[in-house]
Amino acid sequence: MSIDMYTVWQKLAYLIVHKTTLWLLFVLLGTALASWRLAVVLDKHNARQREAALARKTAVGYAATAVILWLLSVVLG
């Protein structure tokens, strides 16, 4: 059983280009904004520093995912 990497790459490129819509990017960036706002609110409570750091990391992850998907859809499209 061998895996044809060329076919896998073609399918992955097709999915990235055709499934990355403007609405997906809006949802990812909106979630990133909400997570960042949650981090700001949690920073105001001194006992919630770990949760604030996690919310910041989550916001950065969502924003990075949106940017990477957008760049890949532009390059591969």
Image (cartoon, helix red, strand yellow):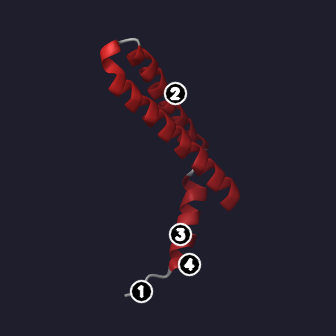
Task: Left or right? Give the position of 41 relative to 76.
Answer: left
The mark lying in front, picked from 4 and 3, is 4
Q: Residues within 10 Å of mark 2 (few under 14, many from 20)?
A: some
Give the number of the disc on residue 6: 4
Q: Earlier in the sequence, mark 2 or mark 4?
A: 4
Which residue is at a point 41% across and 17% down the rendered structure image?
43
Name the quadrant of the N terminus: bottom left
Kindly identify which residue carries mark 3.
Answer: 11
Kindly identify which residue carries mark 2.
Answer: 33
Q: CA distance from mark 3 to mark 2?
A: 31 Å
Q: Residues within 10 Å of mark 3 (few under 14, many from 20)?
A: few
Task: Left or right? Give the position of 39 relative to 70.
Answer: left
Q: Earlier in the sequence, mark 1 or mark 2?
A: 1
Tell me the SS state at disc 1. loop
Q: Earlier in the sequence, mark 3 or mark 1?
A: 1
Whether residue 42 is situated above or below residue 14 in the rendered picture: above
Name the quadrant of the C terminus: bottom right
Kindly identify which residue carries mark 1.
Answer: 2
